Image (cartoon, rainbow, N blue to C red):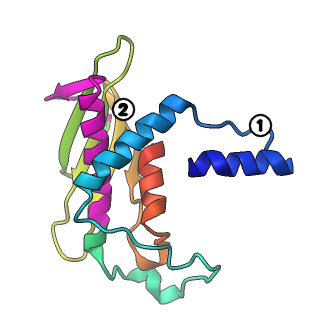
Amino acid sequence: ETYNNGVRSLHDTGWADLSSLLSDDICALLSDVDAAFALTGAHTPGWPNPYQDGLAPDEHVYERVTDPEKFQIVEARARAWSHVLLERGWARHAVHIEWALRPHDSGGTDTILEPVADDAVPLVLTTHTPVDNHQIVTVTVAAGDPAVRLASIPDCGCDGCDHGSATLLEEMDTS
């Protein structure tokens, strides 16, 4: 709804006549994911963008990660997506996937969602858990058979690259 309201506002001002609204089906899907995330993400609180007021980060914050645990929110969002896709009957769990291009992060636990629809491709969500206190949880989003990495979320966890949890969740939703 927030996205659609923004697009409507842009249309009203003439700035983005080519921008499309999200369909009712997409809005309903995202609403279901938000409802599932209320459960899967109950113990992973969000946080605001520390630079939303136009402040630029200091150079020294690009080398530190103050709160690595907060990035568990991306794993919780991935679990919400898995839950909704399985519950809607659009996918089923699979146990093996071939990789055309493996994730940059080593290891990880794959959740492989095989589509029920013909001609659709598998979705792979690989959760990489930290091996020490200086690393963060990341989720690799991949698709296809063989699977190809589409995104690694977050791509950086340093304090200087932090744009708040809403940006990470939006990136999960659009990947």
In this view of the protein, which residue sits in the foreground, 98 or 166?
166
Cα distance, mark 1 to mark 2?
28 Å
Indicate whether 15 appears above or below 64: above
Helix, strand or loop under label 2: strand
In magenta stretch: residue 1: no
The residue type indicated by label 1 comes to: Leu
Q: Please state if 157 lies on the left or on the right of 162 as rendered.
A: left
One can see residue 170 in this view:
yes
Residue displayed at 46% across by 72% down: 162
Q: Indicate the position of residue 144 as horizontal and vertical percent values.
A: 35, 27
Residue 51 placement: quadrant = bottom right
- Residue 171, percent from left and from top: 46, 52
Residue that numbered label 1 is attached to = 18
Residue 4 in the image, given as x and y percentages of width and height: 63, 45
Residue drawn at x 42%, y 42% as measured from the top left:
31
Q: Residue at x 20, y 41 (%)?
A: 110
Q: Nearer the viewer, residue 168 or 4?
A: 4
Where residue 159 sits, quadrant-wise, is: bottom left
In percent of width and height, residue 167 lies at 48, 60
Task: List the single residue furthest toward the right.
Answer: 14
- Name the residue located 24 percent from the left edge and 53 percent from the top edge: 39
Q: Which residue is mark 2?
A: 143
Q: Secondary structure at mark 1?
A: loop
Q: Which residues are magenta?
A: 71-100
Q: Which mark is nearer the camera, 1 or 2?
A: 1
- Which quarter of the figure is the C terminus placed in? top left
Q: Is residue 148 above or below residue 47?
A: above
